[in-house]
Image (tube, rainbow, N blue to C red):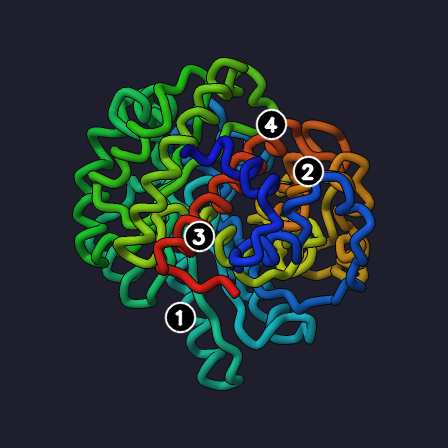
Amino acid sequence: MSCNSYLKQISENDADPESEFIPLLRKINLLNRNTSSNQHLLSPVKTPIKSLELNIAQRCNMRCIYCYGDQGTYRNPGFMNQKIAGSVLDWISENRRFAKKVSIIFFGGEPLLNFKLLKWIVTNCRERTASSGQKFRFAITTNGSFFRSEIVDFLNQHRFSVTVSLDGDSAVQNRNRPFKNGALSYQKIAPDIVNFLKTRNGQAFARATLAAGFNGLQPILGTLQKLGFKRYDYAMVSGAGTKPFLLTDRDFATLLADLEIVCEKYLQEFCNNGGVSSPRILALIQALKSKKPVQYFCGAGKGMLAVSSSGEIFPCHRFVGWKKMQMGTITNYSDSARDSYFNLSVAQSQICKDCWVRNLCGGGCMYENMVYSGNLLTPNTRHCLEMKKRTEMVIYICDRLRTLNKAKLN
């Protein structure tokens, strides 16, 4: 049986007293599709800031056809300098709203264009850890075109979590993500990516962006796996100015059909390895097992903030350059700017409040909501359909694991 019809079947047979899985689904209201709006909402908790995204380079050496960030410049091209970076680190140390363990995420454009500053920031963070006890973890999102030995050694030495933006095989990658001078990118970066992954046993994440005319999900994920990635997933094209490259209705239907097939791959991975290659699927499995409803929107503006190359503060990296969403600057910031984000719950959304999957979804990406509806609380219909499909996949996987005695869910 496919996951497509699985939820319907277990809903119709939820009176089975032998099933330990049905009470779990009922616990977070994933069986009744019409009463989730009546669920009691927890009071929002003002969590500390745990992640800070630094746009250290608002320039890029690629010209991706669907870039939402104005070719990586975010309408204000430039590089973060040491003075601004130092002010950012002082702000972290002096602001009691930051957690004791902070993730610094280097972003762009292409952040490795400013590798000198990246090294300075990491070294400075290590010194601050020694003197103050505040700990830092590091991550980076890169296009994979700068994996020379010096950079690879540095990323590995400081245990960076690395995300590589790569859209698939040579035909797809070269079409979607050419270099700025028009040169083909796959032939240049693929060998370097393979060598990089060998230095860390494949421990990096690849994200493919699906654009109009994509040739199916399985070939894309297969390419990422063959290159040596242990973790990989996809994201649909989204963002301001990307309308010509959005998936067509036919493309989107193909994606949903492909997910039905990929679901079996994830089930087999979990049976073999105790985990799956898709972080989003794994996160959903863990959320389902926790039985804790997700009632508030994504971490943007709450546990996560972003800083532009010139020191402006935004809810997350995707909002960088969007003046309407600016929350201040490094030298002029009040934590009260975060207050409104802690009150954005799915119960306030007219679309989300009666959705059966809201307690695993939380309402989606607020940037995408703003782009498509002009409202932080109103998600794109395609996000909703995809999330429902992923939730059905996870329910199917979890119940199959239960019957195979591979996971204890209660």
Q: Nearer the viewer, mark 2 or mark 4?
A: 4
Residue 123, labelled with which disc?
1
Total number of numbered discs in the rendering: 4
Residue that numbered label 3 is attached to: 282
For image coordinates 53% across by 59% down, the residue present is 20
Marks 1 and 2 in Cβ contact (< 8 Å): no
Residue under pointer 4: 382
* Residue in the image at 49% along x and 50% along y: 56
Local SS, label 3: helix
- Alpha carbons under labels 1 and 2: distance apart: 31 Å
Above or below, 245 against 96 in this view is above
- For label 1, count other residues whose C-alpha is less than 10 Å away and answer few (under 14), some (14-19) or many (20+): few
How far across and down, in percent of the image, does residue 388 sit? Answer: 58, 36
Can you tell which of label 3 and label 2 is closer to the viewer?
3
Reading the image, the residue beneath label 2 is 322
> What's the residue type where badge 4 is placed?
Arg
